[in-house]
Image (cartoon, helix red, strand yellow):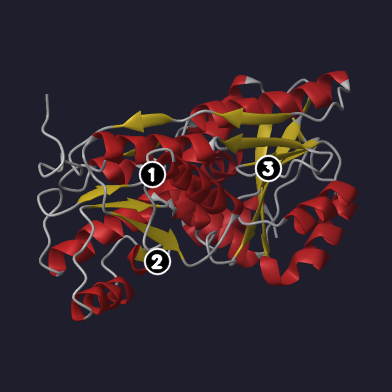
Amino acid sequence: MKMEDIAKMAQVSKAAVSLAFSGKPGIGPETRDRILLIAREAGYKPKSRITTGTNKVVKSILFLVFTNSGIVLEEYYQQPFFKELIQFVGERCRQRNYELIFTTIDMKSFELGVENLAKEQRSDGVIVLGTNLTAEQISVLGENLSNLVVLDTCFDTLPLSFIEINNVMGAYQAGRYLIEHGHTSIGYIASNVRIHNFDERERGFIKALEEHGLSIENSYRLSVAPTILSSQEELKKQLIALQINNRPLPTAWFCECDYIAISAMKTMFEFGKKVPHNCSIIGFDNITEARVITPELTTVQVEKERMAAYAVDLLARGIEHGDNLNIKIKVDTTFIERGSCAFNEVNVSPV
């Protein structure tokens, strides 16, 4: 199958297909997503080496994603957090004159997919989206792929390069903010799919509470799906269970990601609770949708652009200078105060 075939299937020009694979501007995001989806379903893989009119070889970076493992869906490129991260990776690649290639492997075919990828040697280096991967899986990747940088997770004992969010810091900031706003009865809405990032966020949030002699009651620990932006019946059931047991709801909730926070806001509304009048809610990631919902979501800003730049630059240094030094970079977060949180007037009044 050729690029012309993908163009016909998507009813676009060959140039549009090329832009979609390279991550370059010139086509809309919906068109890009549609082309990539059609290509993936057709099993088309773009060439890793592209020549210019002067026959100069353009170096390439492969963006590798393992899908269908709970948090990273098959349509990962449409999920807000990953969509923004990929956009910044593409922009940085263009700035450094690298061609960006996308490859997706279904988690069910992990070993075979890695084996085939190692044989193909389609690029000069690989950025792996590590969000949903275990230490064991990343170790396998390191043994099979050279010039590798893992993005959005970190395992300190592996001799590989990682770029990750300072998850502990971000959640700690959220906990301190709620306490400073007078909240002592605080709930925690976790993802029912566990990954490194979520575990680190839980650690940071609990640390903030413990420093002020607070803790989260077991009955106030809820869990829901982490990739749904609409209200969730499962969360509503857990809230009803608290009500049946005559448990007053917490005055504030920390959610492990913005998806969960936005879903919680919508569920709370259906449950008869207004945000922030009846309860405050904080998310994590600062996806675009956090500024669209009403009230706008108080959240933790993840510096996705900086993470993407570090990943591309680190990989490029290895490709261009043969620098194989493994580095682990933790990128700090910024707390974003918006409208989904309010002072708990019972304990503190705004100055």
Q: Nearer the viewer, residue 285 or 173?
A: 173
Q: What residue would you read off at disc 3?
A: 154
Dot 3 amino acid type: Cys
Task: State which quadrant residue 166 falls in.
Answer: top right
| Category of crowding for the residue at label 1, using alpha-carbon neighbours closer than 10 angstroms: few (below 14), some (14–19), many (at least 20) | few
Q: Position of residue 285 (x, y in %)?
A: 42, 42
Q: Are marks 2 and 1 in contact (CB under 8 Å)?
A: no
Which circle, 1 or 3, is nearer the viewer? 1
Depicted 149 relative to depicted 92: above or below = below
Counting residues from the N terminus, which is met first, the one under dot 2 or under dot 3?
3
Q: Which mark is residue 90?
A: none
Q: Amino acid at mark 1?
A: Gly
Q: Which residue is mark 1?
A: 213
Tell which residue pokes out farthest to the front in this image: 213
Q: 309 or 331, which is in the foreground? A: 331
Q: Secondary structure at mark 2?
A: helix
Image position of 199 with respect to 18: above or below: below
**At 82% across and 36% down in the image, what residue appears?**
147
**Which of label 2 and label 1 is nearer to you?**
1
Q: CA distance from mark 2 to mark 3?
A: 28 Å
Residue 192 is situated, as x and y percent measured from the top left of the image, at: 48, 67
Query: Quadrant of residue 195 in the image?
Result: bottom right
Earlier-in-chain disc, 1 versus 3: 3
Residue visible at 68% across and 23% down in the picture: 313
Of the two numbered discs 2 and 1 on the same chain, state the one appearing first in sequence: 1
Quarter of the image for residue 59 reads top right
The crowding category of the residue bearing disc 3, from other C-alpha atoms within 10 Å (few below 14, some 14 to 19, many at least 20), is: many
Q: Is residue 7 above or below residue 331?
A: below
